[in-house]
Amino acid sequence: SLFKTAIGKNKRLTKSKKGSRKKAVDPFLKKAWYKLIAPSILAVKDCGNTLITKTQGQKVASDGLKGRVVEISLGDLNKNEAVSWRKIKLCVEDVQGYNCLTNFHGMDMTRDKLCSLIRKKQSIIEANVDCRTTDGYIVRLFCIAFTRPQENQIKATCYAKSAQIRAIRAKMTTIMTELGTKGDLKSLVKELISAPIGDNIARDASSVFPIKDCFIRKVKVLKKPKFDVTELMEWHNADEKVAGDVGKPVEAEKETKLAGSGGRL
């Protein structure tokens, strides 16, 4: 009899209450856009925008942005279509207002460029090396090169012997190690972007076997030193050139006096 009374008593639990269904809210209303600022060694500073949910309680927006990695074509960053096959990775290191200050995080090659280099009847030579810059970054550099036929060659193929490949690879590693260890990360990035390191390697290795299409294929930042704001600001403030004639310094002086004497009117 005890069990009989319990049956069918809790019908209300199965019924859904009237106000239980939530009204669908557009998730983009809770989000904010932040600007991505590229280092000053690149021509274009404002390189894009990123989206993040606004600060809510313990979840701070700037913490969610730090560590984000963006990949941008060097053709866009330097306004030079000739190097559009180079991809630069930038990592968000610090957030100031609605600006995300980025730092160099790596470099890569587009797939179509790499595929256009690989052909039949030639040898491919690859080498990679880890090196520590003077400011404490550990960087891994990857190099790629291809053998080419000699002048007036009749034979269709131009394969290198394994001993020759080893000798060229040794030359590659020494040049890359010297490049990586001689200066800080900033000077290394400048060299990678502007200087033709591949041509230097090809010139050095030509004594062993003629090679062509020599590139630093990829760069990875393996380890970074402890975050330092002043160091990051050096990346963003140094070598800053004023774009065109913005204004006269005399006028700027007058403005500072006005603001300092009476504050806000």
Image: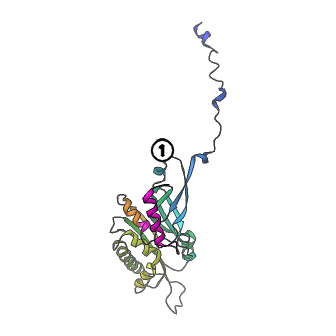
Residue under the point 65% across and 37% down? 23
The vertical placement of 51 against 124, above or below, is above
Residue 255 colored in magenta in the image: yes
Counting labels gives 1
Inspect this view and state whether residue 126 appears.
Answer: no
Q: Name the magenta segment's main secondary structure.
A: helix
Q: Is residue 225 magenta?
A: no
Is 216 in front, or is 147? Answer: 216
Q: Determine whether 174 is above or below 49 in the image.
A: below
Q: Residue furthest top?
A: 1
> Residue 176 location in percent, x, y?
38, 74
Disc 1 marks a residue whose amino acid type is Lys
Q: Quadrant of residue 7?
A: top right
Tell me where residue 155 appears, x and y as whole percent.
53, 88
How crowded pointer 1 is (Cα within 10 Å; few <14, some 14-19, many 20+) is rated as few
Residue 9 visible? The answer is yes
- Image coords of residue 95 (percent x, y): 46, 55
Q: Residue furthest bottom?
A: 152
Q: Which quadrant is home to the N terminus?
A: top right
Stretch of the chain drawn in magenta: 235-262
Horizontal side, residue 141 vs residue 85: left or right: left
Q: Would you place residue 15 above or below residue 126 in this image?
A: above
The residue identified by callout 1 is 59
